[in-house]
Amino acid sequence: MMSTRRCAARFRVRPLAALAAGATAAGMLVAAPTAALAAPAVAHAAHTTAQAAAATSPTGFNPVTARLVDTRIDGTQVPKGQVQGAVFVTLPSSVPTGTTAVLNVTALGAAGPGFVAVFPAGTTPAPTSSNVNYSAGTTQPDAVLVNTPADGRIVLNVGGAKADLVVDLTGYLPASAFTAVGPTRLADSRSNVGLPKGPLTGHETITLPSSVPSTAGLVALTLTATGAQHPGNIVAYPSGGTVPGTSNLNFSPGITQANLVLVKPAGGKVDLQISGGPTQVVVDLSGFTPAGSSVISLDPKRIADSRSGTGLPKGLVTGAVTITLPSSVPSTASAALINVTAASAVGSGFVVAYPGGSKQPGTSNVNYSKGHDDANLVLVPIGPNNTVSLFVGGAGAQLIVDLSGYVSQ
């Protein structure tokens, strides 16, 4: 096991260039609003140290569950209270150098709009993309994949208004399974970069950069919708393929929402189907799975929907429920790649995903609020009999679960 890592205090992130007129945070999107949740706004952890997997997989997903930061209640790694600028977080030594840490980063309680960009310490220049966007009084979580440097230090660059941060570690992928790139902004319809300028609806195509090899299995993209005129959703899928009957990102008028997606490219391109809106669209690249990766893609499939009683009891869900994965996920798989959406909530709450039959961890994957749909990509270990459990805390919500892949070992 590696020695305990220390956090340095001298590093500074340079301010990013301001957006065009009408934007409200430097260099990034802002506000992916979800109204502040009732206490606990985000599920609290009972521990601050990592709990490593019982057996380490050299090729597959390794679950390591820990709440690393919660500026509302603890100042162990980050000063207690709302933060701004470059914030350092040290990953536990159970996450080896060169692997990709799988995090859930939540910003909440801000008095104004802002963003969070996550990257390894020492990265220069600072990335010109973002992982999380927030606005006044909202709670916004997003999945983040970040490379683990030798000293284990990563930076969360908080731009715009001060915000509380909650950082949950869910595990890591070895270098053979995922290659981190960037993060890099590929497309932005607000500035005519990689997409037509202006609010979009219908079909669009994203061309991937040369840093993504033609042999890549999946690309990790953060999709962001902002400035929508009407509700809608975005689906990402292989270029030239059939549009899946699932969604990756749901958006509402007047707010900005983002979600991470792992999607299979075709011919170096990914297609987007934008329904509803129109909306401005921003696409950021954070990495890819190389040839031979243990992360296996499946044609996206809706495996549970409490609105129709598919795979779950019909109606609002509260407490713990268990979902059985389809036979397309082999019994030897170690983790499932699912998109979890909370919709039609009567109030605020959160969703935790964990292996079926296991103890619920003190972390969260989705935070939801009344008035709009909230989704997040989750890489969750699989329990006995190919099961995954979801705990819905708070007011209750409709749950929609889409399967897009699995980790084979």
Image (cartoon, helix red, strand yellow):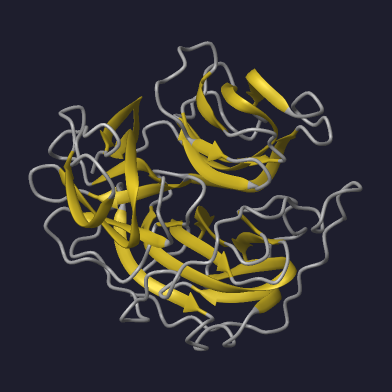
Counting from the top left corner in percent of width and height, residue 355 is at 20, 54
Q: Quadrant of residue 67?
A: bottom left
Residue shown at the point (69%, 68%) measured from the top left? 158
Between residue 159 and residue 346, name the one nearer to us. 346
Figure check: 60 above or below 44: above
Counting from the top left corner in percent of width and height, residue 88 is at 60, 76
Between residue 113 and residue 10, name the one nearer to us. 113
- Quarter the N terminus occupies: bottom left
Between residue 290 and residue 30, name the one nearer to us. 30
Between residue 370 and residue 8, name the one nearer to us. 370
- The residue lying furthest to the left in this view is 385
- The residue lying furthest to the front in this view is 346
- Quarter the C terminus occupies: top left
Q: Quadrant of residue 402?
A: top left
Figure check: 82 above or below 126: below
Residue shown at the point (24%, 59%) measured from the top left? 56
Residue shown at the point (49%, 88%) measured from the top left? 76
- Residue 314 visible in the shown view: yes
Counting from the top left corner in percent of width and height, residue 290 is at 45, 35
| Side of 196 relative to 135 (left or right) | right
Counting from the top left corner in percent of width and height, residue 7 is at 57, 82
The image shows a total of numbered marks equal to 0
- Residue 221 visible in the shown view: no
